[in-house]
Amino acid sequence: MLSFSSRQRYFLYGGATDMRKGFSGLSGLVRAHMDQELMSGDVFIFVNRRRDRIKLLMWDITGFALYYKVEAYAVWA
């Protein structure tokens, strides 16, 4: 279940992300470009070039969780 907490930190990946990437591909982006610990419980945020799709990657006690949202009419600034 997705829940937001003030105990978590949120990191936005600066570049456009290929939304075909899954756990391994997004984890690789975190390791290569964000210099953060993947299994810290922090949330890593990825958006595509058009900014109409967003993925959140986070680690919880049972493993990685990946959340994916497609917006038909909205654009995240």
Image: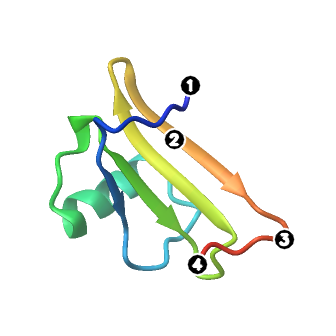
Residue drawn at the location 66% of the way across and 81% of the way down: 50
At which x and y percent is residue 23?
A: 43, 46
Q: Position of residue 14 (x, y in %)?
A: 37, 77
Label 2 vs label 1: CA separation?
10 Å
* Residue that badge 1 annotates: 1
Residue 4, x across and y down, in percent:
46, 37
Q: Nearer the viewer, mark 1 or mark 4?
A: 4
> Marks 4/2: CA distance?
21 Å
* Residue to which mark 3 is pinned: 73
Asked if marks 2 and 3 touch (Cβ < 8 Å), the reply is: no
Please report whichever mark, 1 or 4, sits nearer to the chain's N-terminal start. 1
Q: Which residue is mark 4?
A: 77
Residue named by callout 2: 66
Amino acid marked by disc 2: Leu
In this rendering, the label closer to the viewer, 2 or 3? 3
Residue 54 quadrant: bottom right
Q: Amino acid at mark 3?
A: Tyr
Q: Secondary structure at mark 4?
A: loop
- Asked if residue 62 is positioned above or below residue 73 in the image, the reply reads above
